Image (cartoon, rainbow, N blue to C red):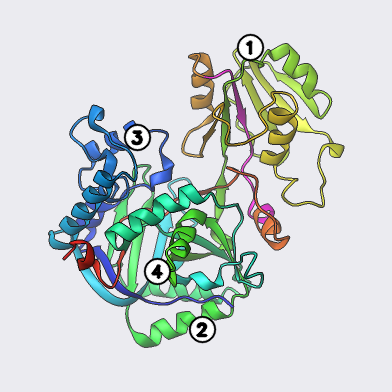
């Protein structure tokens, strides 16, 4: 059984123009603080002022340290400005329907139900029967950084993306009915031209019907936001912001790698790869982004190579070991390049918001020695890993389209405790 609860105090845009001003990317979608600073110059009212307040400064040279006391104080002041300013209003005891239309798939709207998920339902070693299943390990320093922001500002901005198998289609039908019945409360278009629309649900009977539909779901899988839910748990919070999306309309983009390695002699690497892969040199040298499971791209200044793992190089019965990110980590980075830890600074992970041409350009300009392009994980692979109660390989899932921050902000019961009116 999966629970969803209405949010007691929700800060939302007053209209679509306000939503366009406030909405922003999630904090973890950027390659650098300078990118965040640039985004704030383009959209000075963006919620990034709250989630990444250390970048809300006059010049790039003034960028501070994320989580530093000065940054947390600035975040608190920026939240106060949102509450008191002309862009936002407060609503009480609501759920919401959230629709995202990806510009690349305009005929397939991804629609979910937003509200508070229950922290006590997260599956952990001490709660092995929990119905909300995480798919990756938690790094406490990262979760603690988010928790510090939550505690200081007394609000929750980051939303956890939870996937549910709506096998009967009842939840999807109920969500679509809301969308078809009336105009949205507000909408905005993000930086890559995806459309985001929100319908607030405040009628008690409607809330109860959606809660019943959610209670029929045996499990939910954390698609994006493991550390956001962990931050709430660290603070002893009973709930955290989430949107539950039926899996039937969800999809993933590639999650690629850039590598700095003094050992990346291409002839030596290709020779070693032949032990575990079928290796083919791609002669046209066009950026190569695989879209088929177990086809992997490797780029060096000498050109592109296609790698296909040999059947005996992974355990097909182990859902996590069958993910191409795990195959690459074990058989390329670990065995050949000696990079045994995915957190090694020689590895840079590049999400689906950058294409293979970008990776090729970073190798060509000398910033990196190798690029590796991986096919997107399929929804079935993702759910198989969760069903087997395993963890996904690090940096293997890039769900798109991304939930945007700032369209809803949960303000906790006593924001005045930290100077927020």
Between the residue at mark 3 and the residue at mark 1, the CA separation in whole angstroms equals: 32 Å
Residue 410 vs 213, above or below: the answer is above
The first of marks 4 and 1 along the sequence is 4
Considering the numbered disc 1 on the image, is that residue within a helix, a strand or a loop?
A: loop
**Pointer 2: what residue?**
212
Horizontal side of 113 relative to 89 (left or right) equals right
Residue at x 31% of width, y 67% of height: 184
For the record, the magenta segment spans: 368-381
Task: Estimate the x, y position of residue 210 in percent, counting from the top left.
Answer: 46, 79
Is mark 2 in CB contact (under 8 Å) with mark 1? no
Considering the numbered disc 4 on the image, is that residue within a helix, a strand or a loop?
A: strand
Query: Is 379 part of what is drawn in magenta?
Result: yes
Answer with the quarter of the image where residue 76 lies.
bottom left
Between the residue at mark 2 and the residue at mark 1, the CA separation in whole angstroms equals: 58 Å
Considering the numbered disc 2 on the image, is that residue within a helix, a strand or a loop?
A: helix
Residue 355 vs 92, above or below: the answer is above
Q: Nearer the viewer, mark 3 or mark 2?
A: 3
**Pointer 1: what residue?**
302
Residue at x 47% of width, y 48% of height: 142
**Pointer 3: what residue?**
33
């Amino acid at each position: 059984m999966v629970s969803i609860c209405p949010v007691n105090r929700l800060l939302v845009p007053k209209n679509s123009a306000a939503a366009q001003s406030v909405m922003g990317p999630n904090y973890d979608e950027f390659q650098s603080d300078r990118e965040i600073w640039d985004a704030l110059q383009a959209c000075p009212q963006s919620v990034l002022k709250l989630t990444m307040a250390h970048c809300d400064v006059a010049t790039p040279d003034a960028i501070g340290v994320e989580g530093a006391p000065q940054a947390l104080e600035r975040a608190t002041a920026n939240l106060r400005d949102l509450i008191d300013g002309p862009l936002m209003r407060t609503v009480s005891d609501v759920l919401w329907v959230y629709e995202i239309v990806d510009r690349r798939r305009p005929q397939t709207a991804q629609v979910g139900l937003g509200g508070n998920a229950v922290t006590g339902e997260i599956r952990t070693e001490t709660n092995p029967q929990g119905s909300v299943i995480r798919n990756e390990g938690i790094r406490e320093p990262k979760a603690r950084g988010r928790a510090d922001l939550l505690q200081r500002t007394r609000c929750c901005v980051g939303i956890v993306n939870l996937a549910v198998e709506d096998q009967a289609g009842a939840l999807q039908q109920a969500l679509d009915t809301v969308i078809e019945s009336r105009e949205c409360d507000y909408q905005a278009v993000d930086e890559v031209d995806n459309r985001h629309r929100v319908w607030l649900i405040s009628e008690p009977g409607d809330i109860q019907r959606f809660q019943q539909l959610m209670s029929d779901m045996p499990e939910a899988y954390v698609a994006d936001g493991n550390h956001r839910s962990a931050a709430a748990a660290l603070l002893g919070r009973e709930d955290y912001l989430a949107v539950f999306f039926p899996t039937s309309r969800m999809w993933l983009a590639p999650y690629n790698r850039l590598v700095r390695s003094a050992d990346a002699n291409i002839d030596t690497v290709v020779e070693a790869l032949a032990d575990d892969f079928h290796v083919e040199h791609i002669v046209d040298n066009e950026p190569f982004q695989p879209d088929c499971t177990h086809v992997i791209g490797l780029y060096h200044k000498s050109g592109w190579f296609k790698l296909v793992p040999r059947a005996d190089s992974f355990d097909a019965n182990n859902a996590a070991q069958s993910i191409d990110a795990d195959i690459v980590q074990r058989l390329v980075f670990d065995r050949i390049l000696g990079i045994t830890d995915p957190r090694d600074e020689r590895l840079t992970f590049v999400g689906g918001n950058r294409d293979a041409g970008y990776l090729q350009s970073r190798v060509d300009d000398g910033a990196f020695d190798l690029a590796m392009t991986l096919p997107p994980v399929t929804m079935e692979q993702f759910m198989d890993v969760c069903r087997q109660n395993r963890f996904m390989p690090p940096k293997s899932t890039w769900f798109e389209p991304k939930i945007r921050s700032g369209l809803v902000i949960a303000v906790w019961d006593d924001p005045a405790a930290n100077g927020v009116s």
